[in-house]
Image: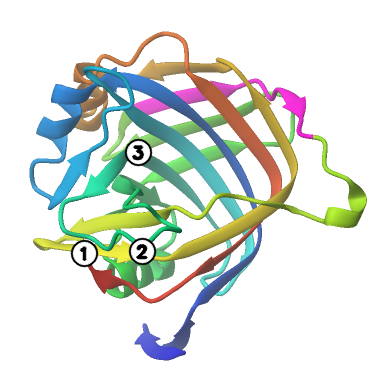
Amino acid sequence: MARHIIQGREVTTPVEVRDATFCGAAYLVRADAARAVLAYADAEVAEVLPGKAVCVLGFVRYHDGDLGPYNEFCVAFQVRPADGPRDPERAGAGVFTHWLPVDQGFTLEAGRTLWGFPKELADIDVRIGSPYKRCIVRRDGRLVLDMLLRPGVPVPVPAALGPIRFPRVDAVTCLDGLTRRVPLTSGGTGVRLRPGGALIRLGNHPIAKELSELGLPKTALVSVTARHVRMSIGEAVPA
């Protein structure tokens, strides 16, 4: 266990998230465009099909956790770290967090300090109370993205097995020229899956332009919602 002081408060790792709601979609995008976006980091875009990479867009409402309640949006890519560990459990895989706006200052400083997450403040309107899940992100007064998800079918899990345990895939970050791996384990209940299921409207912010240049298709590969998610986020290590 490591101890850190953030804004006068002690935070220990692993940081625990006891309850959060996640909504996200995976898209097949141009691998060459993804490589151009991640040129600043020591990470290799994973081609899942010839010329194609996976980009994940998602939003989270953190209800209860060590960093407090807040909303978050994420732009991430599936990668193979150039020189990262290759143990059998991870097989070198990772999800590179490229953009991670949040709406609270404490989690912003903690995320940047502890793990090198590229957190920045934004206006994030998360709406999860209706059957359709929606997130509107604005930065510097400009619309970045308006994302709408239609949840799919429930993933059946026998009650005796408890929450679904999600596959272990480390987060990969790069801040101030340092690429890190962040061990993250998670599980959840109320998980729903479907092919497609997401609608996106891009705004006029530079991040929106960057997303459009990836060649985002109109239809997502798959969308996922999870009503109650738990996470444990460990100490970052250089990649």
- N-terminal label among 1 and 3: 3
- Magenta residues span 144-155
Which x, y percent locates residue 53?
A: 29, 26
Mark 2: which secondary structure?
helix
148 or 166, which is in the foreground? 166
Circle 1 residue = 239
The residue sitting at 66% across, 27% down in the picture is 193
Circle 2 residue = 108
Distance of label 1 from label 3 (alpha carbons): 20 Å
Which kind of residue does numbered mark 2 sit on? Leu
Which kind of residue does numbered mark 3 sit on? Val
232 on left or right of 169: right
Query: What quarter of the picture does the C terminus occupy?
Result: bottom left
Q: Does the rendering let one see residue 182? A: yes
Q: Indicate yes or no whether the magenta region holds residue 149.
A: yes
Mark 3: which secondary structure?
strand
179 on left or right of 159: left
Give the image quarter of residue 108.
bottom left
Label drawn at residue 75: 3
Which x, y percent locates residue 142?
A: 29, 30
Which kind of residue does numbered mark 1 sit on? Ala
- N-terminal label among 3 and 2: 3
Q: Does the rendering let one see residue 8? A: no
The residue sitting at 55% across, 50% down in the picture is 167
200 on left or right of 180: right
The residue sitting at 49% across, 24% down in the picture is 147
Label drawn at residue 194: none
Mark 3 touches mark 2? (CB < 8 Å)? no
Mark 1: which secondary structure?
loop
Task: Sort mark 3 into few (<14), some (14-19) or many (20+) by Cα contacts within 10 Å.
Answer: some
> Which label sits in the foreground, 1 or 3?
1
Which x, y percent locates residue 58?
A: 48, 37
